[in-house]
Image: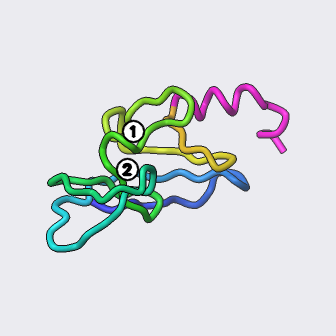
Amino acid sequence: MDLKTEPPLRPGVGVGTVGNAGLLGCTSANCAACQKPIREKYLLKALDQFWHEDCLKCACCDCRLGEVGSTLFTKANLILCKRDYLRYLLSFPSKTLS
């Protein structure tokens, strides 16, 4: 399953899904977070990049996004889980209503 990015909800906000890209096969890929080669049997693909399962994490709570669901959010160059994305929106309500 590959990442399917939906249209942004607001300018600067992205919503996507975390997909399991399956077997790496003969292709070699480096992790977008740690830049190390991905040698595991499975890898994640999100935001058109490949990730180790341990490296794709929420920037706020550090949870592994592949374990908490299949949706991720981006805001201000941060990758967030749904819970922290909603907390981010609630902390800046005037900006989200415009």
Number of marks in the image? Answer: 2
Q: Which residue is found at the position 16% from the left and 73% from the top?
A: 26
In the image, residue 36 sits, relative to residue 25, either above or below, namely above
Q: Which residue is found at the position 19% from the left and 52% from the top?
A: 40
Q: According to the image, what is the colour scheme of the structure?
A: rainbow
Return the residue at label 1. Answer: 65
Return the residue at label 2. Answer: 18
Dot 2: what SS? Answer: loop
The extreme bottom residue here reads: 26
Badge 1 amino acid: Leu
> Left of 81 or right of it: where is 53?
left
> Left of 90 or right of it: where is 17?
left
Which of 96 and 41 lies nearest the eye of the viewer? 41
Which of 6 and 33 lies nearest the eye of the viewer? 33
In the image, residue 97 sits, relative to residue 2, either above or below, namely above
Q: Position of residue 4 (x, y in %)?
A: 42, 61
Q: Which residue is found at the position 71% from the left and 27% from the top?
A: 90
Q: Position of residue 46 (x, y in %)?
A: 41, 56
The N terminus is located in which quarter?
Answer: bottom left
Which of 11 and 39 lies nearest the eye of the viewer? 39
Q: Which residues are magenta?
A: 83-98
* Image quadrant where residue 29 sits: bottom left
How many neighbours does mark 2 have within 10 angstroms: few (below 14), some (14-19), or many (20 or more)?
Answer: many
